[in-house]
Amino acid sequence: MAEVFVIAVTTALVAVSAILNGWVLATIWAWFIVPFGIQQIGIAHGIGICLVGRLIMGGANGIGNNDKKYKDNVEKLLVSVGALFFAPLFVLCVSWIAKNFM
């Protein structure tokens, strides 16, 4: 029963992360690409572009790196969740700062 819960939580976190990445990409696209006359994309297109990029890059984001030693699975989960949600929000924050200098 615990395995089913872990799989369900992991699936939900990955789905929410994909939506967050798609929203961030669509927002940054609207800020930096649309002014050049290129059509705006929606969140669904952003999700697709992010997933294709992750597929091409081989998921190279540091998650699942077995070189690091964690105290327990909870610490490993927290690091993974932090990487899933912190990275796109950090990119959005830096992009917002750059947008304000334009």
Image: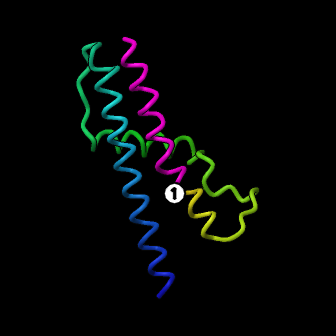
Q: Position of residue 34 (x, y in %)?
A: 27, 20
At 35% from the left and 20% from the top, the residue drawn is: 32
Which range is magenta? 81-102
Tell me, yes or no, whether the highlighted magenta stretch contains residue 34: no
Q: Amino acid at mark 1?
A: Val
Examine the residues drawn in magenta and state their main secondary structure: helix
At 42% from the left and 66% from the top, the residue drawn is: 11
Drawn side of residue 32 relative to residue 76, left or right: left
| Label 1 SS | helix
The colour scheme used to paint the residues is rainbow
Whether 97 is drawn above or below 63: the answer is above
At 43% from the left and 19% from the top, the residue drawn is: 98
Q: Position of residue 37 (x, y in %)?
A: 24, 14
Drawn side of residue 10 relative to residue 35, left or right: right
Drawn side of residue 6 relative to residue 64, left or right: left
- Residue named by callout 1: 81
